[in-house]
């Protein structure tokens, strides 16, 4: 009787044990996050120059942690730059610091080199910062997408009051003003035959054609 009872208990335990169902579905492992690019700081950027990785005549700029190659200056861009230089110095020289292709430090990971920046007139011991800059101008042909895209947002986020982009292909001037929330609230497009008045700089009034080659 004892042996029979023991056998009955074992049978009951086997019957009570939960049954494992095999569905045949194998769980996929969670995908790893995509690799992120390394972001350089301004200090990293200058260190690359000190140790010789970046040469003095390399045409590069630091945009939001990325070292970006600048396109070659073709004849159209060069002529536009020459005409813009004369116009800006004639209208603003003496009261403002008109800078041609020199760096502007916008933060810990951005130091672009715009074609022109108009800064407050003072004795600079370092590159001007966003607080010093009143207007930035880019003469653009091959870099138009970048100038109207990421660079526009970068300048707006830094609080640059006014940003001009000369579209050398369409022969129009894009004027961006009133930065707020990481973008410009105002965008005007002026034809070559039109005159334009800067919102930030009252002496800056000229015909768009004066900026064109």
Image (spheres, rainbow, N blue to C red):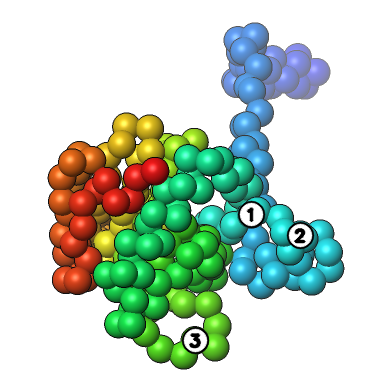
Residue furthest to the right in view is 51
Residue identified by numbered label 3? 124
The answer to whether residue 69 shows anywhere in this view is yes
Q: Are marks 1 and 2 in contact (CB under 8 Å)?
A: yes
Q: Is residue 206 above or below residue 201?
A: above
The tag on residue 60 is: 1
Question: Relative to 126, is 2 on the left or the right?
Answer: right
> What is the x, y in percent for residue 116?
42, 62
Q: Please tell me in which quadrant of the rendered image residue 203 appears.
A: bottom left
Q: How far is disc 3 from disc 1 in space, using C-alphas?
A: 22 Å
Q: Nearer the viewer, residue 140 or 3?
A: 140
What is the spatial separation of the Cα atoms under label 2 and label 3, in whole angstroms?
24 Å
Which quarter of the rendered picture does the C terminus lie within? top left
Query: Would you name the residue on which mark 2 appears?
Result: 54
Task: Name the secondary structure under disc 2.
Answer: loop
Tell me, yes or no, if residue 146 can be seen here: no
What kind of element bears circle 1? Answer: strand
> Distance of mark 1 from mark 2, alpha carbons?
9 Å
Q: Earlier in the sequence, mark 2 or mark 3?
A: 2
Q: Position of residue 28 (x, y in %)?
A: 64, 23
Judged from the image, the secondary structure of the residue bearing numbered disc 3 is loop
């Amino acid at each position: 009787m004892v042996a029979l009872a023991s056998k009955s208990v074992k049978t009951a335990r086997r019957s009570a044990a939960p049954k494992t169902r095999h569905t045949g579905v194998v769980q996929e492992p969670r995908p790893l996050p995509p690799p992120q690019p390394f972001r350089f700081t301004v200090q990293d950027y200058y260190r690359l120059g000190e140790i010789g990785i970046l040469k003095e005549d390399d045409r590069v700029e630091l945009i939001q942690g990325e070292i970006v190659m600048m396109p070659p200056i073709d004849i159209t861009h060069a002529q536009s730059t020459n005409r813009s230089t004369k116009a800006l110095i004639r209208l603003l020289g003496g009261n403002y610091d008109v800078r041609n292709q020199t760096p502007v430090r916008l933060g810990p990971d951005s130091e672009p080199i715009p074609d022109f920046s108009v800064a407050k007139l003072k004795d600079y011991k370092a590159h001007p910062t966003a607080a010093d800059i009143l207007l930035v101008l880019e003469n653009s042909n091959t870099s138009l997408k970048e100038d109207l895209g990421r660079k526009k947002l970068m300048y707006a986020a830094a609080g640059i009051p006014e940003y001009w982009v000369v579209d050398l292909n369409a022969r129009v001037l894009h004027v961006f003003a009133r930065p707020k929330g990481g973008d410009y609230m105002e965008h005007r497009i002026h034809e070559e035959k039109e005159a334009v008045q800067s919102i930030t700089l009252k002496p800056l009034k000229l015909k768009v054609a004066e900026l064109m080659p």
